[in-house]
Structures are given as C-alpha cells and as structure tokens.
Amino acid sequence: MTKRLVIKVTAGADAPERCSQAFTVAAVAAASGVEVSLWLTGESSWFALPGRAAEFELPHAAPLPDLIDGIMAGGRITLCTQCAARRDITESDVIDGVRIAGAQVFVQETMADGVQALVY
C-alpha cells in the first residue's frame, strides 16, 4: 500500500513557525517516498504565486522555495478554490504545477485508504 499524507496549511507569514513546519514536514515526507498532497489555505495561499515564497524568512528554517521544489518533485500542491477567489488568484497566476481545487477534492483525498492527514 502506498503511504500518503495530506497536509493542510492555513498559516503564512502571519504565523511563520507553523507555516514552515507544514512545508518542512511535507518536503521531508516527499523526500522519504511518501505521496504528499499539500493544501494551501488562508494566508498560505499567497505562496502559490511565483516569487512569494522567496519573500518568506524564518531564522534556522529551510528556504520555502527549496521546500516547495521538494514537495513538487514528489507530490502535489493545491490552492483552495475559495481562498484563491478571496485573493483574486486565478489558475493563470499560480506557479506551474499548482492546481486550484475545492473541499470536495480535499475530502476525497483525506478519506482515501491509507491516508494520514495533518492540519497546520
């Protein structure tokens, strides 16, 4: 059975440690061969835009762009539909490979066999 992990991150620059923890766990899991699905919601939604992750700083933390690259190499990043709409973000705005999807897809992913889910 494939190991799968779904992580929903709600924090962005407003709660940098929580944000960094979510991206770090997702990147480490992906590097370990776990199938990762990282969901960007709330303030983390901004990291779906090109260049925004490079603006994020947290002492003693891995750079967010590197973590995103690691996640994308072994998993998927999804931006919440409603969160995108509230910020006027469209599919043409996001980093290549980031999809926009809603609650129905999130529920499908988290309810699948063998899935562990975390919320940050």
Image (spheres, rainbow, N blue to C red):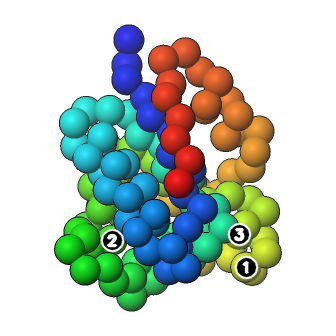
Tag 3 residue: 84
Report the side of 3 relative to 79 (left or right). left
- Distance Cα–Cα, label 3 vs label 2: 20 Å
Q: Position of residue 81 (x, y in %)?
A: 74, 59
Q: Amino acid at mark 3?
A: Ala
Q: CA distance from mark 1 to mark 3?
A: 5 Å
Label 1's element?
loop
User: Is 63 on the left or on the right of 26, as rendered?
Assistant: left
Query: How many residues crowd mark 1 within 10 Å: few (<14), some (14–19), many (20+)?
Result: few
Q: Which numbered circle lies on residue 87?
A: 1
Question: Disc 2 to disc 1, how far (Cα)?
Answer: 21 Å
The residue depicted at 48 percent of the width and 17 percent of the height is 114
| Badge nearest the viewer, 3 or 2 | 2
Residue 26: x and y in percent read 37, 48
Q: Identify the image quadrant of residue 65.
A: bottom left
In the rendered structure, are the residues bearing label 2 and label 1 in contact, judged by CB atoms less than 8 Å apart?
Answer: no
Q: Residue at x 49, y 29 (%)?
A: 116
In the picture, the disc for residue 64 is 2
Query: Marks 3 and 1: in contact by CB < 8 Å?
Result: yes
Q: Earlier in the sequence, mark 2 or mark 1?
A: 2
Residue farthest to the bottom, as pictured: 55
User: Considering depth in this image, is 68 or 93 the residue closer to the camera?
Assistant: 68
Count all numbered tags in the image, as a single digit: 3
Determine the residue positioned at 40% across, 69% down: 17
Query: Which sits earlier in the primary sequence, circle 3 or circle 2?
Result: 2
